[in-house]
Image (cartoon, rainbow, N blue to C red):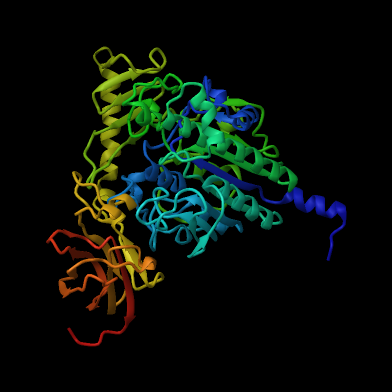
């Protein structure tokens, strides 16, 4: 039945607001024209900046996966099992309560499009964490080991609702096009969209029409491509917002734009010495300095009166997003782990909130098997920044963090050290836990990737396709959970299974839960298949492929399939 126009208007006005969260990868606070960049042109982001409520002191983690886990859960990343981008420490616990799970509990459709980087297997995939519709690349970057073989940003194949699917066009264009298509399909019901671009993360690939103008301005080639990738994002933001206008969704859609860590421009320019713009901040991605974790955050929602180009100067963070959405949109929050963030609804609405707490917030870079205390850490309170427990900076008088004033303010150092100690102690039990890939359950078969080998701090795993192409002699175990007793097939591959390529190996070995198996191989073999009996519970799986010259690595891809009940009593 078609409702009368007046009734339609009442129904529309009473509808829950949509939420779209756009997060880009490696774009720093300074890489927006409205933030003073002298070269980069971002007219559409500038327009959004001018219309939004801006969190001007907004902090995330200094690297990709940690920020994403904290953002989606409202909890410090280390609590969720994430404190690295590879080496088995980028997988988020299945037990976490996520933003999409909250929205699903409130009747929303949910979608995740683009970069996930929180695990490629159950229970860590976006479809396991509350998203109905998923289009994503595996895992940390396009071209990483878990990603579809030889994806190169153009005409790539992405995981779409559990199946590989071929797309045409540039990756960022595809993400926004798919997002526009999905919101068009869901326009008559409330929805939550998590649109997460891999750009401008390296490798720096973009059409020349976006990068050449910056080369003409004297910008080094890789930095020009980096800027060109941002220019392409900006263009897509403009097109996407027009789509929202055309669909009549703008008025009652909360649009959030943010980035996942500080700029990668520092890494690009550190050898050339080219002076890039970083809004006066020290450091860049992967650093505890301000430039490593302070990022843009724009909130725009006309019906909710989040407009007008206002600044929120209170210190806020990624952990505040989930509790703020719950409070701001009056959502019912299911039971879940204790949150670290708080609602920032009052500051967003421009209220003088005397009770808004002056907090100590924390960030750290823990590219390690077990996080070392104090390393690459910052404790933040007001304008104070305590770096690694020793060096103190006052951003009010020294925004570039050039002068250590620890000796002049011992009481501030003492307080921030004590706050950090309390925080660290609260993380200790979480750091003892290991996120495990589940075998023989909801995802069967399961393809394991060398990206997720549990490696010691000093070793970098074979996380990228380049390492796999070279045949790097690296090996490590997977932490796994066998869901049920039974017979399991374990198949080792040198190359991605769907390539069906010859391994050119002479021997294969596997070890899991005390079971050890080996076999000789013909050089033309494309796989090495074993069958083992496994009992339910946590364990480790390790594999070996032996070259004709004796060199050994792990099997970069290993498929595990539950076959059925145990055949013997062992």
Instruction: Say if 477 sits above or below 346 in the image.
Output: below
Residue 56 seen anywhere in this rendered image of the structure = no
Q: Quadrant of residue 262?
A: top left
Residue 559 seen anywhere in this rendered image of the structure = yes
Between 225 and 558, the one lying in front of the other is 225
On-image quarter of the C terminus: bottom left
Q: In this view, does 20 lie to the left or right of 244?
A: left
Instruction: Say if 480 sits above or below 116 in the image.
Output: below
Q: Is residue 31 left or right of residue 351?
A: left
On-image quarter of the N terminus: bottom right
Between 67 and 326, the one lying in front of the other is 67
Residue at position x 67%, y 50% in the image: 16
Residue at position x 31%, y 71% in the image: 560
Residue at position x 37%, y 39% in the image: 63
Q: Quadrant of residue 167?
A: bottom right
Q: Where is residue 321 in the image (x, y as percent from the top left)?
A: 50, 41
Residue at position x 56%, y 25% in the image: 33
Q: Is residue 90 left or right of residue 224?
A: left
The residue positioned farthest toward the front in the image shown: 524
Between 333 and 280, the one lying in front of the other is 280
Number of labelled discs?
Answer: 0
Instruction: Say if 185 sits above or below 406 in the image.
Output: below
Q: Where is residue 359 in the image (x, y as percent from the top left)?
A: 40, 30
Q: Position of residue 76 (x, y in %)?
A: 37, 43
Q: Where is residue 345 in the image (x, y as percent from the top left)?
A: 56, 36
């Amino acid at each position: 039945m078609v409702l009368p126009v007046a009734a339609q208007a009442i129904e529309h006005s009473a509808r829950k607001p949509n939420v779209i969260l756009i997060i880009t990868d490696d774009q720093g606070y300074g890489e927006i024209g409205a933030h003073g960049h002298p070269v980069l042109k971002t007219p559409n982001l500038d327009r959004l900046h001018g219309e939004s409520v801006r969190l001007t002191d907004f902090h995330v983690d200094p690297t990709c996966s940690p920020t994403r886990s904290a953002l989606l859960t409202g909890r410090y990343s280390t609590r969720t099992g994430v404190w690295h981008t590879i080496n088995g420490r980028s997988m988020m616990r299945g037990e976490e309560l996520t933003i999409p799970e909250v929205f699903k509990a409130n009747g929303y459709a949910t979608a995740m499009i683009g970069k996930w980087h929180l695990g490629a297997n159950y229970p860590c995939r976006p479809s396991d964490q509350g998203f109905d519709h998923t289009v994503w690349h595996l895992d940390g970057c396009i071209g990483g080991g878990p990603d579809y073989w030889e994806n190169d940003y153009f005409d790539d194949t992405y995981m779409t609702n559990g199946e590989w699917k071929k797309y045409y066009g540039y990756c960022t264009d595809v993400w926004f096009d798919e997002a526009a298509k999905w919101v068009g399909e869901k326009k008559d019901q409330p929805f939550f969209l998590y649109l997460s671009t891999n750009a401008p993360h390296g490798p720096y690939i973009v059409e020349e029409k976006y990068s050449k103008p910056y080369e003409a301005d004297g910008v080094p080639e890789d930095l020009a491509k980096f800027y060109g990738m941002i220019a392409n994002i900006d263009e897509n933001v403009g097109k996407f917002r027009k789509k929202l206008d055309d669909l009549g969704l703008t008025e009652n859609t909360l649009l959030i734009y943010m980035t996942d860590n500080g700029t990668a421009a520092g890494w690009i320019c550190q050898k050339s010495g080219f002076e890039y713009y970083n809004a006066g901040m020290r450091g860049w991605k992967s650093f505890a300095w301000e430039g490593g974790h302070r990022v843009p955050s724009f909130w725009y929602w006309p019906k909710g009166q989040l407009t007008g180009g206002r600044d929120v100067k209170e210190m806020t963070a990624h952990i505040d997003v989930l509790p703020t959405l719950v409070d701001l949109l009056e959502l019912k929050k299911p039971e879940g782990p204790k949150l670290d963030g708080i609602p920032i609804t009052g500051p967003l609405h421009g209220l003088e909130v005397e009770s808004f707490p002056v907090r100590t917030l924390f960030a750290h870079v823990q590219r390690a098997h077990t996080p070392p205390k104090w390393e690459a850490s910052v404790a933040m309170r007001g304008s104070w920044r305590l770096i690694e427990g020793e060096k103190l900076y006052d951003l009010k008088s020294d925004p570039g963090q050039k002068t250590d004033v620890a000796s002049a303010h011992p009481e501030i150092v003492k307080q921030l050290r004590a706050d950090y100690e309390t925080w660290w102690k609260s993380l200790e039990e979480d750091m003892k836990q290991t996120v495990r890939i589940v075998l023989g359950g909801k995802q069967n078969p399961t393809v394991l990737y060398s990206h997720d080998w549990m490696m010691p701090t000093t070793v970098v795993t074979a996380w990228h396709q380049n390492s796999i192409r070279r045949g790097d002699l690296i090996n490590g175990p997977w932490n796994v959970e066998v869901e049920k007793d039974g017979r399991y097939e374990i198949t080792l591959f040198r190359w991605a299974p769907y390539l069906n390529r010859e391994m050119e190996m002479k021997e294969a070995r596997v070890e899991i839960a005390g079971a050890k198996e080996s076999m000789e191989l013909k050089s033309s073999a494309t796989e090495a298949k074993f069958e083992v009996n496994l009992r339910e519970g946590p364990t480790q799986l390790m594999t070996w492929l032996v070259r004709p010259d004796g060199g050994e690595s792990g099997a970069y891809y290993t498929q595990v399939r539950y076959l059925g009940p145990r055949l013997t009593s062992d």
